[in-house]
Image (tube, rainbow, N blue to C red):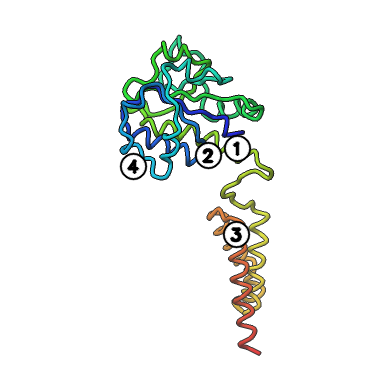
Amino acid sequence: MNLNNIVVILDHPDESRNIGAACRAMANNDINELRIVGERSNYDIEHIHVLAIHAGGIFDKAVFYNSIKEATADCVVCAGTTRRRGKKRGKLLLPEEFAAHVDSITEQNGKIGLVFGNERTGLTDEQLDQCTMGITIPSSDNFGSLNLSHAVQILCYHLFRYKLSAKEGGYKGYTPLPLDRIDKTVGVITDNLQKVGFFKMPGREDMEEFWRSLLSRSALSESEAQYLEKTFTKIAGLSSKQTD
């Protein structure tokens, strides 16, 4: 995923502060090209910079256009975002599906336009007709409308995460350990408890069952398992020194 080829397009946003928050959301995800359908003079630059924090430069470099068609003329894909489904809205992709769809296009230096509608009305059918495909972000039936900057954040984040996942070795968060790895930690714990005389040989099996049950329920991570092993090994070592 080449994030340099992702373009965020805001169609007549109402609120200057929302533009600033959208700039911050873009910067969080290494996306830096902003285009706005509307007039620069309609927006309060100070309000934009307050919400953008250190991402105000994204707005300062933004280019303004008269229509979505003009703003996306150099894009290979023009994707309109909408929460409403209907006959005229065609097949809508989820954010993660869209990321997978456009990955190879961005790698071949094709620009991808992400079009976001006005905060109050979203994209009309006429505006969506200027797009080549649609994206939807599922939300509550009771309160489905997302803040503009939140929608920008969600879409940009999925593209950013897709890039991270494609890196060599992937980008992994916390992964609970399987039981065979937990058994290794249980062995280290009980070996060291036995060394300090915490139990006699007949009690080892019960102790192992206790620790295996406890650690499996805690969904232990690799770093946590290693920390436990080092702790009990150090306890046994200190006990040995005191008895020498």
Is residue 169 positioned above or below 102 on the image?
Answer: below
Residue under numbered circle 2: 30
- The earlier-in-sequence mark between 4 and 3 is 4
The x and y percentages for residue 60 are 42, 35
Q: What residue type is labelled 4?
A: Val
Calculate the distance from the C-alpha at mark 4 to the C-alpha at mark 3.
40 Å
Q: Label 4: which residue?
A: 50
Which residue is tagged 1? 163
Q: Is residue 169 above or below residue 122?
A: below
Say which label, 3 or 2, has the lower sequence index: 2
Q: Say whether marks 2 and 1 touch (CB < 8 Å).
A: yes
Query: Does the CB distance between marks 4 and 3 fall below 8 Å?
Result: no
Dots 1, 4 in contact, CB < 8 A: no
Question: Disc 3 and disc 2: Cα gap in Å?
Answer: 29 Å
**Please, what is the three-letter code of the amino acid marked with disc 3?**
Ser
Mark 3 sits on what residue?
Answer: 223
Question: Are there few (<14), some (14-19), or many (20+) residues within 10 Å of tag 4?
Answer: some
The kind of residue on which mark 2 rests is Asp
Q: Which residue is drawn at 57% across and 30% down?
A: 5
Q: Nearer the viewer, residue 151 or 192?
A: 151
How many tags in the picture? 4
Q: How far apart are marks 2 and 1 (CA)?
A: 10 Å
Give the spatial CA distance, label 1 vs label 4.
29 Å
Q: Which amino acid does label 1 sit on?
A: Lys
Q: Is residue 170 above or below residue 82?
A: below
Q: Is mark 1 on a helix, strand or loop?
A: helix
Q: How far apart are marks 1 and 3 (CA)?
A: 26 Å
Circle 2 packing at 10 Å, graded few (<14), some (14-19), many (20+), is some
Of the residues under marks 1 and 4, which one precedes in the sequence? Answer: 4
Q: For the residue labelled by badge 3, is the local secondary structure a helix, a strand or a loop?
A: helix
Query: Do residues under tags 2 and 4 come within 8 Å of each other at their CB atoms?
Result: no
